[in-house]
Image (cartoon, rainbow, N blue to C red):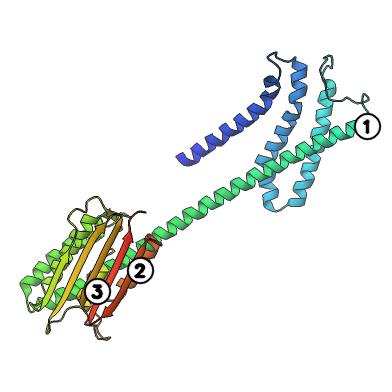
Amino acid sequence: MSPLVKNSTINNVALHLLVWGILFAFPLLFSGGDFPKPNIYLRTVLPLVFTTFIFYLNYFVLIERVLFKNQIVLFIFLNLGLIALCMWGEDWVRDMIPRNNPLPRPPARGQVSSGFRSFYHFRAAFSMALTVAVSVAIRITQRWLKSEAERKAMETEQLKSTLSHLQYQIQPHFFFNSLNNIYSLVDSAPEKAKDSIHRLSKLMRYTLHDATPEQVHLSSEIAFLKNYIDLMRLRLTDKVDVQYDFPEDADHTLIAPLLFIPLVENAFKHGVSASQASFIFIKMRIEGKRLIFWVENTNLPKDERDKGGSGIGVENLQKRLRLLYPNKHEFRQGVQDGIFRVDLVIDLNV
């Protein structure tokens, strides 16, 4: 049994003991300080004894095994029989108790009119029926709360599974693009290719190990982005201007891992050219509880036949943002005057 379930069970038992303890103590609380005679006290608490019996017989047995099995008619008849039996038992016990006290007492057979006794029995039956209704209400409420808790737990697990799947999709997509870049250097610049493999190993270590928690320090993400940018720079010519600006103090900010790499990847894929001047500008800043990130690059869309990437990066990112930061993010991208720009704003006050 888990600690949470164990504590809940203990709390339920304590609550039941408290409620019934107060009910059984009522005769003492209103006795004026004098402990009532045993026969008077027993006669006073006798209805509670049978009420408690009906309550827990329903609570632990009948509701679960009959009512929740959709045997409603059987449940009603069983309780009618149970109420009749308890009323007969209560009358029998009352008649067995000595009635030599001056206090008002419940009516005995042959001592009151049938009309008054019928009213007394109606009141007793109504009280017991109300006890059954309360027991049913409590059990239905508990069952609903348990179902809600299980549903929320299932939704949480499904959300985690979906996020893990989306995050793991990033890795092959990321490595595929990186290996393509390294492959292009093998013949033309073997030393750069070796350096690229070394840098890629560091990036792989981060994605496979350091980026596994639900949140990481923003400074770790920034270091990862810088390493990736340096890796990509190895294959660029002097015609490509790459600049970035990241906040220096980012140790105290937490963020979901690998959110920005698809946007940076996209900039290198569609924003650089080996034959003409091009640029990539990357900037991030923190304003209060808002993280603002944007990328600008020369708009040089690849030919549709170019298979340099799977094309899932940005789409994957948008799905993750909807799951991780619902109604707490803004994402925009577009082309203006030959410049492609993407803006991402995240409200970190989650």
In this picture, residue 61 sits left or right of residue 349: right
Which residue is painted at 77% across and 18% down in the image?
A: 40
Disc 3 crowd, CA 10 A, few/some/many (<14, 14-19, 20+): some
Residue that mark 2 sits on: 318
Up-down relation of residue 40 to residue 267 (above or below): above
Picture layout, residue 62 above or below residue 343: above
> x and y percent of residue 305 in the render?
26, 86
Q: CA distance from mark 3 to mark 1?
A: 91 Å
Q: For numbered disc 1, what is the local secondary structure?
A: helix
145 left or right, relative to 250: right
Assign a secondary structure to mark 2: helix
242 relative position to 308: left or right: left
Q: Which element is circle 3 on?
A: helix
Answer few, some or many: residues within 10 Å of disc 2's Cα (few below 14, many 20 plus, some between 14 and 19): some
Which of pointers 2 and 1 lies earlier in the amino acid sequence?
Answer: 1
Q: What crowding class fits label 1: few (fewer than 14 Cα within 10 Å), some (14-19), or many (20 or more)?
A: few
Q: Which residue is mark 3?
A: 266
Image x and y of residue 285, in percent = 23, 60
> Sequence order check: which comes first, mark 2 or mark 3?
3
Percent position of residue 47, x then y: 76, 29
Q: CA distance from mark 2 to mark 1?
A: 78 Å
**Amino acid found under the numbered disc labelled 2:** Gln
Numbered tag placed on residue 114 in the rendering: 1
